[in-house]
Amino acid sequence: MTTSSAGGGQLRLATAFALAALTAGCASHQTYRNPNDPWEGFNRVVYQFNDDLDTVLLKPVAKGYQFITPAPVYRGITNFLDNVAGVRNGVNNALQFKMTRALTSVGRVVVNTTVGVLGFVDVASNLNMPKYNEDFGQTLGTWGFASGPYIVLPFLGPSTGRDTIGLVADWYTDPLTYVNDGGVAWGLKALRVIDRRADLLAASKVLEQAALDPYAFVRDGFLQRRRSDIYDGNPPPEPDDLLDLADDGAPAE
């Protein structure tokens, strides 16, 4: 999971999984029930709550933030926040025994924090030090834990049972958790939410324009992306895919 730049990488990733979900076909919830989503009724209610909150609060704030922030400052803030997340990346790569990636992640943090002025300049990417995004949900998946049911969390959005458990560990590997000044810590966390939402404004347009059922669109895209994340972008075929391959290879009668 290598990305060359911070905000642009998130935007391309979000757009890619949205388009992948669309091309895979988003069947209407009235005719298809996803076995990974046993709590669909509850999840749809929470999804609508989150969507309404985004429409009236988060999206307008993100648009305003993007509009008033000069491009170099906007990029610098995104780089800084991504550098903070590099600590989590390093820890989880190590827990997955991907030691080369773990050392690269730590090296990125050191280089960007020092030469890159606290991470506002992404010097590490210019030195061909790739970024490997990992979180504890992915670590649990690598260890063999099943994803569990799909869950839409209030305020936080799409998740799974496994990823929800992983959020606890992610809290402890987030350097902002250890900022002593509570006002500064929560201010930086709020800035991170707004900055990420601003990065996804273009992807949200794809969702609004393309999806017949936005809920299913987001769910299927999220589950596909998380499965790809666990296998570092190269997931094995799913059982249905194997059956299709077997049918294609069967001799004609």
Image (spheres, rainbow, N blue to C red):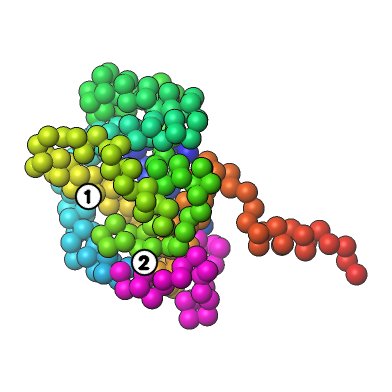
Tag shown at residue 5: none
Does 243 sit left or right of 166 as displayed?
Answer: right
- Front in this rendered view, residue 178 or 131: 178
Confirm whether residue 136 shows in the render: yes
For marks 1 and 2, the one nearer the N-term is 1
Horizontal and vertical percent position of residue 101: 47, 28
Q: Residue at x 24, y 62 (%)?
A: 54
**Where is 68 relative to 176, above or below?**
below
Residue 192 sits in quarter: top left
Callout count: 2
Does 171 sit left or right of 250 as displayed?
Answer: left
**Most distant residue in the top direction:** 115
Residue 182 within the segment the image draws in magenta? no
Report the residue marked by disc 2.
Answer: 208
**Where is 215 relative to 69, above or below?**
below
Horizontal and vertical percent position of residue 169: 33, 43
Tag shown at residue 194: 1
- Front in this rendered view, residue 252 or 69: 252
Residue 181 sits in quarter: top left
Look at the image and give the residue range highlighted in magenta.
21-46
Q: Residue at x 36, y 69 (%)?
A: 43
Does 39 sit left or right of 113 as displayed?
Answer: right
Quadrant including the C terminus? bottom right
Label 1 crowd bin: few (<14), some (14–19), many (20+), radius 10 Å? many
Horizontal and vertical percent position of residue 104: 43, 24
**Where is 162 relative to 107, above or below?**
below
- Work out how far the residue at label 1 is from the one at label 2, CA to CA, in angstroms: 19 Å
Does 30 sit left or right of 80 as displayed?
Answer: right
Q: What amino acid does circle 2 point to?
A: Glu
Q: What amino acid does circle 1 point to?
A: Ile
- Circle 1: element type: helix
Q: Residue at x 46, y 68 (%)?
A: 37
